Amino acid sequence: MGPPRESTPEHWQRFWSDGRPLEDVYSNQERLLAEALRARDVRGCRALEVGAGTGRDTVALVERGAVGFVVDYTFAALELAREASRRSGVPVHMVCADARALPFRDGAFGLVFHQGLLEHFRDPALILSENRRVLESGGVALIDVPQRYHAWTVLKQILIALDRWFAGWETQFSPAELERLVRRGQLEVSRTYGEWMVPGLPYRAARVLLAKAGVRGLPMYPHGPAWWDRGWEAWRAWLKERRWALYTCFVIGVVARKPGAGGSDSAAPPGNRGAAAARPGGAPLPGGVA
């Protein structure tokens, strides 16, 4: 038996450098942005996105007054984040580093968040430990992961077993499992949320297969008649208020806080808030890659 499969920087460098334009990468439809704005006032807040992805969430936070940082261990992801920053005309600090050893001082950020990150590490507690370390007292952490009881999990595990999964290896969590993990990381759970895959898995798979066959033109987000869309939105809004419905979601997330009060954002003058986050050896470069 060989060593257990892992998700490596090489997997992600290949994934993010496959030539897809930024607008052809499915977004989370501002799910994390909505949770961040619900959890705290982001104006003047130093916000760190761990695992840059496309960087669109950080750009949206900066547009609302945050000081944005993204960290990733692949340059391809940081290039996408740089492109999102350039298109929007807002500054984002970009740092090439490992999520398990963040190059920032303790208590540097008022908000730390990630989506599609925790599930790719065999020891997720180490990621959460670093999240907590760089959070200020009373700071907010958003942890967004795949939900265990979903058809996507079955497909994913088959592809992992066949060594065909794009990320090499990945796990998933139930709402209760994620909450326990976050609490063990000495963070206080404030809220657990979930979201469904829209559009659904069959449509997304068909769109990808047709594109590979040279058939393009299917919209990323198809719409039905207005009454149909309104009905589905109302149904999902009703479900979001039910705890049991979390176990039907595609993704789930936890909004948590680092115990304590106060914060370091107000301690640094506005002009110094970007530089104040770094510790020696890990200084971020605005608009570039450190």
Image (cartoon, rainbow, N blue to C red):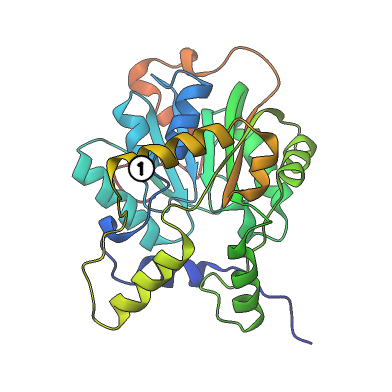
Which residue is disc 1 drawn over? 229
Residue 32's x, y, as percent? 47, 37
Residue 161's x, y, as percent? 67, 80
> In the displayed image of the protein, which residue is found farthest to the bottom?
1
**Foreground residue, 208 or 135?**
208
**Foreground residue, 53 or 171?**
171
Residue 31's x, y, as percent? 45, 39
As shown in the figure, which amino acid type bears the numbered disc 1? Answer: Asp
Q: Which secondary structure, mark 1?
A: helix
Q: Residues within 10 Å of mark 1 (few under 14, many from 20)?
A: few
**Foreground residue, 246 or 115?**
246
Q: Residue at x 53, y 23 (%)?
A: 39
Q: Give the answer, above or below, for where 263 lies relative to 73.
A: above
Q: Is residue 2 left or right of residue 236?
A: right
Residue 263, picture quadrant: top right
Residue 231, picture quadrant: top left
Q: How many numbered marks appear?
A: 1
Q: Residue at x 33, y 35 (%)?
A: 60
